[in-house]
Image (cartoon, rainbow, N blue to C red):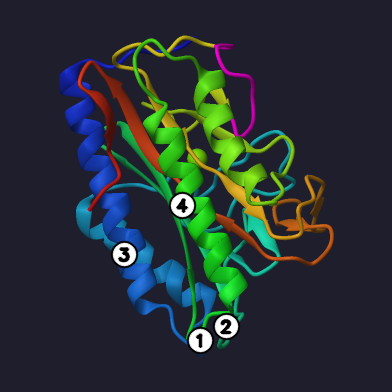
Amino acid sequence: MVEFKSEASLASMREAGRVVATALAEVERAAAVGVSLLELDRVAHEVLRAAGASSPFLGYRPSFAPVPFPAVICASVNDVVVHGIPDGYRLRDGDLVSIDCGAVLDGWAGDAAVSFTIGTARPEDSELIAATRRALEAGIAAAVVGNRIGDVAHAIGSVAREAGYGLPEGFGGHGIGRRMHEEPDVPNEGRPGRGFPLKPGLVLAIEPMLTAGGKDEHATDPDGWTIRTVDGSRAAHVEHTVAITEAGPRILTLP
Ligand code: MG
Ligand code: MG
């Protein structure tokens, strides 16, 4: 069932989104050569704790997962697309890092992700991240009353395909509210004019993830969580929680 949020609920979701944005900014600030992914997880955890928020990631166990997720961020480095588990890996010069973080505050969830590079960026990584951000912007721009989910999906997919990148099949965004994952699904590729109609109060997590090698297949690590490209090429992932309103799309996960 899809829940449409009142203006008061959107205001609460904005506060949850602000916590997520702060956590991501702090993690990006802390990320440097030699810093471990576990240290980045601690940085985000401290932001959530200080805000009185809980993590919808920590202990999360969807049907596909053999173990509950053990952290408050997903840390996906280089060929990891999404759902990387923070571990003792220490960041190296030129790494491409995607950090995904969620927060639940006063019963409302926020969900966002950023991609960035460590030290000296490879030009092709900067291009991949820029295209992934453009895909997110296009998806957000299409999140207007009167459009449908397919219009958002088509906007994201068009940016990715025109740049020659891949879109891991079966992964995409989602409705969000009291729970992190709600209906409807928001695919990263689709047909315009199709799917669930966008109405005021609908809130979506829009999250393009693009692979540099152009392949749509993915591989799953033995941990059951970590999603990698099949060709070893790098991937980027960015996400915002966005409310559909009469005045246009409202991003709830800005700082
Ligand atoms: Mg997320
Ligand atoms: Mg999400």
Mark 2 closeness class: few <14, some 14–19, many ≥20 residues within 10 Å: some
Query: SS class of the residue under badge 2?
Result: loop
Residue 201 is situated, as x and y percent measured from the top left of the image, at 29, 16
Q: Return the mark for residue 120.
A: 1
Determine whether label 1 and label 2 are within 8 Å by CB: yes
> Residue type at mark 1?
Thr
Determine whether label 4 and label 1 are within 8 Å by CB: no
Q: What stretch is highlighted in magenta?
A: 187-195
Q: Can residue 27 be seen in this view?
A: yes
State the residue at coordinates (35%, 33%): 242
Residue 136 is situated, as x and y percent measured from the top left of the image, at 46, 43
State which tag comes first along the sequence, 1 or 3: 3
Q: Return the mark for residue 94.
A: 2
State the residue at coordinates (66%, 56%): 81
State the residue position of label 4.
133
Q: Can residue 75 be seen in this view?
A: no
State which tag comes first along the sequence, 2 or 4: 2
> Residue type at mark 3?
Ala
